[in-house]
Image: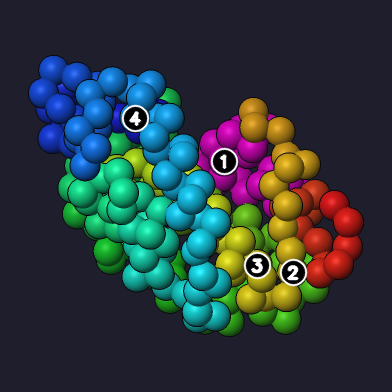
Amino acid sequence: MNDKIGDDRDPYFYPGLKVLRNVLNIHEAAGLQEAELALTALRAASLALGPANMGLPWLCAIHHTLFQDIYPWAGQLRSVDIYQNDIRFCHFAYLETEGNAVMQRLEEEDYLRDLPFEPFCDQLAVFYADINMLHPFREGNGLAQRIFFEQLIIHAGYDIHWHPLDRQEWLRANEAGAFGDPAPLAALFRRAVSEPGDDV
């Protein structure tokens, strides 16, 4: 697992194992990962396009839909602090407050609707970095966030295709965003986002 609290006190793990407690009672990391990939793919394929005015409850609903077959806490804000390399994500006690604040800003920006392409990608990168710094769930943040933003992009009148993006380049851009520089993310969104009907 990429997310961690840095010691062995994480209550989401089975005792003595680096495996998240799960409804399938799988105690082996590779087996859990395989099940997670398969089950979330099925759920993602049937996920409905959400409301045009999106917020933290919808992000939680997406996570619940994706991970309900795997984790008993699917869709619930985490109750521990988590880190990834040198990045410490939002303190768990502030997740609801900070999450709603980001979503309020998004609402004030009219969910990025009616923006020309260049400023759209710039603002998309800012909000992507901000929501990424929340990392509101114990696991599954990346998938839930990508789907949230796919729907945001569609409602704003654009399309997105992730396949042009290199994984390592994407991770580096997210790290830059975590340290206050959304420009690399904006550059990647300019490659992945398109007008409806355009080839990417």
- Dot 3 lies on which element? helix
Query: Where residue 32 is drawn, which disc sits there?
Result: 4
- Residue wearing tag 2: 158
Mark 1 or 4, nearer chain start = 4
**In the rendered view, does 169 fall on the left or right side of 195?**
left
In the rendered image, residue 170 lying in the magenta stretch gets the answer yes
In this picture, which residue range is highlighted in magenta?
169-188
- Dot 2 lies on which element? loop
Mark 3 neighbour density, 10 Å: few (under 14) some (14–19) many (20 or more) = many
Q: Nearer the viewer, residue 95 or 149?
A: 149
In contact (CB < 8 Å): disc 3 and disc 4: no
Query: Where residue 174 is drawn, which disc sits there?
Result: 1
* Quadrant in the picture for residue 116: bottom right
x%, y% of residue 183?
A: 69, 48
| Nearest-to-viewer mark from 1 and 4 | 4
Label 4 sits on what residue type? Leu
In contact (CB < 8 Å): disc 3 and disc 2: yes
Label 2 sits on what residue type? Tyr
* Quadrant in the picture for residue 126: bottom right
| Nearest-to-viewer mark from 2 and 1 | 2
In contact (CB < 8 Å): disc 1 and disc 3: no
Mark 3 or 2, nearer chain start = 3
- Residue wearing tag 3: 153
Alpha carbon separation for disc pair 1 and 4: 25 Å
Mark 2 neighbour density, 10 Å: few (under 14) some (14–19) many (20 or more) = many
